[in-house]
Image (spheres, rainbow, N blue to C red):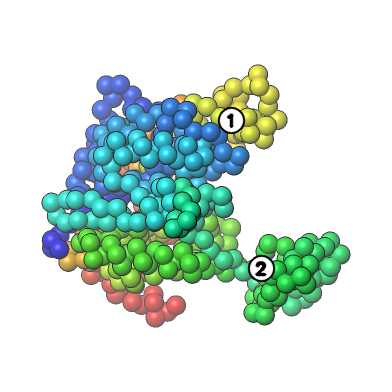
């Protein structure tokens, strides 16, 4: 292992437009990214020339762009991509295969999806002068039909994403549990389940958890919600990390997760925190989170960084070239309507939705150095993506002098014992100061 290696990461790149001709403003950001040996973004679109069939469900917007857009990501300096997310199967398996084809041709190291579970979950390796880096990618936000399938001796696997499933249990008081059971008895929501138990196809639970349809409830004096990562997926992830740390000097885990805590989009779900810490326990050197399109806090765990969400880097979901009938029908539009009509209808002419939330259009680019496998220094460069501009103008990152972005991130990071110093227009996390704070936080928790 080389003593020192530098990393740069961004959140979601939902890219649907080419960089403007002769506009070299992106180079300021590219210079920051190119400081690093490992340079990462999350690709949140399928890239093909209408080579996929629109899925019956999507990640929200059916995400598609031209394969030539990979050249613009190259121009920013990226050399690694994750593409396990809630848009990977927007254009079904053909869209996934086409995207993979163009990714393979592009020269990017990419991870998180593939022709079966083995390919989707395996580490992919970036060769740098300062060491070999492994990338493992997964997503917790997906439709169940998008899971990659295991290969068998007698059956091929299923193309899809590397999943991180999780279990959610709702905590309610004994009084509310009685009410819930009464509702179940009069609405027959559990009738099919009860019949399956009676006929031997299901076994009745004996763990104190009550099933109300597909939702799980448990009696507790304090009401709320708890989540935990699925043991199967956690085990597979640990297997990949154990393999990667024997094959590379550093292991990076990417996780795409929209799931939130207590209805707060800026707070990661409980299972994500457990997942991230377990990955580092097993040997990962950093966890790069993205998905909710807003910043979440940073934790320094065992002298290694966890970015619970880096928000958006490129966000152009309002300039997709095409949308399927399903999207138009959702908003009661007809075949005479077009993409612009559909996007106007969804946003109620930009009075609701992403375009009205400034936090969607503010983010940071972290650049960090690791020495002998531990964090030495981490710098945070704030960026803005054009909040308030027309939808065909916004979505490109520019360096920002807005210290409020760093202040908000610092506040979100405080519960993890993370101190972010603001020096001019850059946020800085230093290891020595951080170690003491984290230890105190752990004792307090």
Q: Residues within 10 Å of mark 1 (few under 14, many from 20)?
A: some
Q: Which residue is pictured at 50% across the width and 47% down the height?
A: 86
Element marked by disc 2 = strand
Element marked by disc 1 = loop
Which quadrant is the N terminus positioned in?
bottom left
Residue 62 falls left or right of residue 70:
right
Residue 115 lies, in percent from the top left, at: 42, 47
Query: Is residue 367 at all visible to an observer of this figure?
Result: no
Q: Earlier in the sequence, mark 2 or mark 1?
A: 2
Q: Residues within 10 Å of mark 2 (few under 14, many from 20)?
A: some
Residue 288 lies, in percent from the top left, at: 36, 55
Residue 235 lies, in percent from the top left, at: 42, 68
**Mark 1 — residue?**
324
Instruction: Tell me the number on the disc at residue 216.
Output: 2
Residue 163 lies, in percent from the top left, at: 47, 56
- In the rendered image, the residue lying farthest to the top is 336
Q: Is residue 16 above or below residue 236?
A: above
């Amino acid at each position: 292992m080389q003593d020192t290696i530098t990393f740069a990461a961004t959140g979601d790149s939902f890219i649907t437009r080419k960089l403007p001709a002769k506009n070299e403003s992106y180079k300021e950001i590219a210079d920051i990214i190119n400081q690093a040996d490992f340079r990462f973004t999350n690709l949140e679109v399928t890239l093909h020339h209408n080579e996929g069939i629109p899925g019956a469900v999507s990640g929200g917007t059916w995400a598609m762009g031209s394969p030539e857009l990979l050249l613009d990501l190259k121009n920013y300096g990226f050399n690694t991509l994750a593409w396990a997310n809630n848009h990977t199967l927007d254009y079904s398996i053909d869209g996934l295969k086409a995207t993979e084809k163009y990714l393979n041709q592009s020269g990017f190291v990419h991870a998180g999806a593939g022709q079966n579970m083995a390919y989707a979950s395996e580490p992919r390796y970036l060769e740098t002068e300062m060491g070999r880096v492994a990338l493992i990618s997964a997503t917790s936000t997906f439709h169940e039909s998008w899971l990659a399938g295991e290969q068998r001796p007698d059956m091929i696997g299923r193309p899809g994403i590397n999943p991180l499933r999780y279990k959610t249990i709702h905590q309610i008081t004994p009084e509310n549990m009685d009410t819930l059971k009464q509702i179940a008895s009069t609405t027959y929501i559990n009738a099919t389940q009860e019949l399956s138990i009676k006929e031997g196809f299901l076994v009745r639970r004996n763990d104190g958890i009550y099933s109300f349809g597909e939702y799980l409830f448990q009696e507790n004096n304090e009401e709320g919600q708890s989540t935990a990562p699925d043991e199967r997926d956690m085990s597979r992830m640990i297997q990949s990390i154990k393999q990667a740390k024997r094959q590379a000097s550093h292991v990076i885990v990417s996780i795409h997760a929209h799931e939130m805590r207590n209805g707060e989009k800026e707070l990661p779900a409980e299972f994500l925190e457990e997942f991230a810490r377990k990955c580092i326990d097993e040997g990962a050197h950093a966890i790069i989170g993205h998905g909710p399109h807003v910043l979440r806090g940073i934790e320094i765990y065992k002298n290694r960084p966890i970015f619970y969400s880096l928000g958006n880097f490129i966000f152009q979901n309002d300039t997709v070239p095409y949308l399927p009938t399903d999207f138009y029908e959702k908003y009661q539009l007809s075949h005479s309507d077009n993409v612009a009509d559909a996007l106007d209808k969804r946003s109620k002419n930009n009075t609701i939705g992403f375009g009205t939330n400034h936090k969607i259009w503010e983010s940071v680019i972290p650049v960090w150095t690791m020495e002998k496998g531990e964090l030495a220094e981490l710098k945070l460069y704030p960026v803005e993506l054009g909040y308030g501009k027309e939808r065909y103008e916004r979505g490109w990152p520019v360096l920002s002098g807005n210290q409020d972005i760093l202040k908000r991130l610092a506040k979100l990071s405080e519960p993890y014992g993370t101190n972010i110093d603001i020096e001019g227009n850059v946020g800085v996390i230093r290891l020595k100061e951080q170690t003491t704070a984290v230890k105190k936080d752990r004792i307090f928790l």
